[in-house]
Amino acid sequence: MLIETSSLPGLKGWELKKNLGKDYLEAIKVASLEADKLGMKITIVPDDEAPKDFEKARFVLMTKEPLSEADYGRWLRIEEIASLAMILVEISLRGGSVPLEVIIRILTEKLPRWRVNQIISKLERLGYIKEENGIVFEDWRSKVEIDETGFIKDIILYRQDK
Amino acid sequence: MNNKEEEFKKIIELPEALKKLGGDPFAVNVEELLQKINANKLKDRVKSLKYESQALNSVSIVVEKQEEWVLDALKGLKIDPQLIKEKVKQMPFKDLGLILAKHTTPTLGIKRISRERIKMAVEYLGLVEPWGKKASLGSVTRHENEYTQNIVFDKRFEEEAMEFYEKSLKEELQKSKTVPYKGFIDKFDEKLKVAFYIAYLSTVGLLSVIRNPLTGETLITSPRGGEFESVAIPFG
């Protein structure tokens, strides 16, 4: 589960079945108990087109606690995290989707256009956002990894002088 | 009118239907609609383009209505969404990133684990997992790949192990043929490290670790093969 192929972590259900046999879900249950002892959890991310099919779902290993500051560098660069934050705020305030041109306009107020393009395509590649016909949505990774309510709440409560 | 055209028509009329019925715009799954538009290509290319552009226009109206709905809901809570947007714009990038990170539990991948930690994990596994199942002598074939190269089999460790063998073990093995494992390990302060050196030296065929069936004692010997293959031993 730790090996990242094509930038995406985790394994598809069919890959687990191929390696562990047809009772792979039982093995996942045992692995979940062991992961829990180590401060991790196994999350099943359903496939958009077949949400009930475990073989098409992605099985990923996650930490149970949020990132510590020392780990940010191995996640994303700070301007990438901040850009993702701005995109998620926009998506959230607009009810789940936002035109790509709006995202580009907002981010180019802070960063050069070439860097904005780089960041958007990186966030897409990593599964944080997805773009269809010029409209941007949250992708599976944002849904699974980010506590959106807590995030927006902290934005509202933020005071620059604190 | 065929099924595909009917689907298009339904999407095109959606904003009007929402307006008439006063429904919740979030009852509409925008993502699903876009997938439908992409999938419903008509044979007549001109007609298809016409329907697609009308349908996309309707979807953008629905997206707009969803935004309005959220704005109204936030205003009801006395939170001005425009204020939030402005706040985000004014916030230093670092603070914005830190807030998001505070609410993120990341998916784990090998790229997020430092080389040092991977090495520690592999050393740990080397100690708890049975090894030495290989009957013939000689070095064990390593399945090196981009992950293990330079990470797991650290050149420095190999050099240290060889140096340890030359200095502390080779002469003793030549003198007495067998060395009691426990007694030998106990002579050193870094017992765990020495145990791992011995495990490594055994895998490259410089020595064997066997158990005397009569006394149960574990012994380090000159390299042997066949039924005398090395055994796994618990440490600690």
Image (tube, coloured by chain):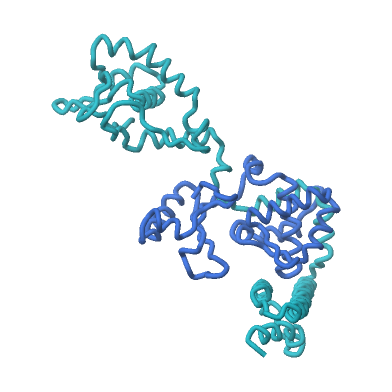
Chain colours: A blue, B cyan
Residue B134 visible somewhere in the drawing: yes
Relative to A43, say whether A49 is above or below.
below
What x and y, as percent, mark residue B48?
72, 79
Which residue corresponds to the image point at 68% horizontal and 85% vertical from the top-left? B5
Count of numbered tags: 0
> Relative to B161, is B143 above or below?
below
- Horizontally, residue A51 falls left or right of residue B196, namely right
Give coordinates of residue A130: x percent, y percent. 68, 61
Q: Residue at x 40, y 19 (%)?
A: B189
For residue A149, say whether it is visible: no
Foreground: A114 or A97?
A114
Image quadrant where residue A18 sits: bottom left
> Which residue shows up at 81% across the image and 51% down it?
B91
Q: On the picture, is B89 further left or further right than A14?
A: right
**Snapshot quadrant of residue B79:** bottom right
Identify the residue at the far front of this view: B44
Residue B29 on image: x %, y % = 66, 75
Q: Quadrant of residue A92?
A: bottom right
Left or right for A39, reference A140 = left
Q: Is residue B184 above or below residue A3?
A: above
Q: Residue at the left extreme? A: B214
Measuring from the top left, give residue B110's x and y in whole percent: 54, 43
Q: Nearer the viewer, residue B207 or B112?
A: B207
